Amino acid sequence: MPPLRTALLQSSGRPGSVAENLKVLDEAAGRAAATGARLLAAPEMFLTGYAIGDDVARLAEPADGPSAQAIAEIAARHGVAVAYGYPERDGELVFNSAQLIAPDGSRLANYRKTHLFGCFERDAFTPGDQAVVQAELDGVRIGLMICYDVEFPENVRAHALAGTDLLLVPTAQMHPYQFVAESVVPVRAFENQMYVAYVNRVGQEGEFEFVGLSTLAGPDGVARARAGRGDELICADVDPAFLAASRDANPYLSDRRPGLYTPLI
């Protein structure tokens, strides 16, 4: 299989304006497609903004709502899959979610954040209850996770055991936790033998200062691409052949001894 060219949109868009953020996503999808990318990933809560207070509930939409339909049109027009974060409404409940739309505009997967961070998220959202959500794109098995989720090693290991090749992690990583982007994410990629794409917001938003530093880390723990602290579109390849060779050389999963770990759960 050829490498899967993957683009990460590091941006906070325009918090509070869904229409403007759809425009930003459309423009980024065009630029990503021009580089040969087949996948574009945007940050956590990109559709609406993160620190928008009560507007989280007001702007929340169903997974198949009007914004999802608009993003499906963007994906199909540019021929690139799009993963994006948004507040998902399901009846009276609101989830911090990430959705993956295929290059033909079909909906591939929807994930609800399982580990909520801080009082703001616990007050605004209901936690999801499905740890592993996956989809196939061009022969690559893609998993979805959101921000704080990746800081729990058990969470990422569950994806490794389920065969995830590329873990997409839309995030809203804030100061002073930039070490997660710099150190934790590459280690997660290495210890689980997968690619990890960690795509962040930037700048000041409410009380939060988002640090950027989006990265796509390979199974060797090396960043294939890393952004700075401002708005940026970065691209790198997810190479199935390199991943297979790396897994052969680093047999973490086959060397596990699960019987020793049962006290952990």
Image (tube, rainbow, N blue to C red):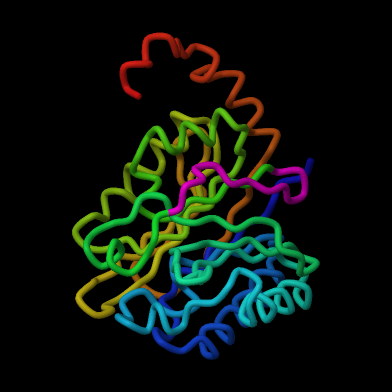
Residue 190 higher or lower than 99, as above or below? above
- Looking at the image, residue 65 sits to the left or right of residue 184; the answer is right
Give how far across and how far down residue 205 sits, in percent.
28, 79
Q: Is residue 233 visible?
A: no
Which residues, given as a range, are shown in magenta?
A: 128-140
Q: Is residue 137 magenta?
A: yes
Identify the residue at horizontal 65%, vertical 56% (top origin): 109
| Residue 188, magenta (yes or no) | no
Residue 5 in the image: x percent, y percent?
A: 67, 55
Q: Is residue 67 above or below residue 143?
A: below
Describe residue 80's horizontal placement relative to residue 152 as left or right: right
Query: Residue 79 falls in which quadrant of the image?
Result: bottom right
- Does 67 sit left or right of 14 as displayed? right
As drawn, which residue projects farthest toward the front? 92
The quarter of the rendered structure image containing the C terminus is top left
Q: From what the image shows, is residue 19 above or below residue 197?
A: below
Count of marks overlaid on the render: 0
The reply, left or right, for residue 3 in relation to residue 233 is right
Q: Is residue 33 visible?
A: yes
- Seen from the viewer's position, the closer of residues 194 and 95 is 95
Q: Residue at x 78, y 78 (%)?
A: 77
Query: 17 and 39: which one is in front?
Result: 17
Q: Residue at x 44, y 10 (%)?
A: 257
* Residue 81 image point, x, y percent: 69, 63
Is the magenta region chiefly helix, strand or loop? loop
Residue 159 picture location, percent across and down? 53, 36
For the N terminus, the image quarter is top right
Q: Quadrant of residue 54?
A: bottom left
Residue sitting at 32 percent across and 61 percent down?
173
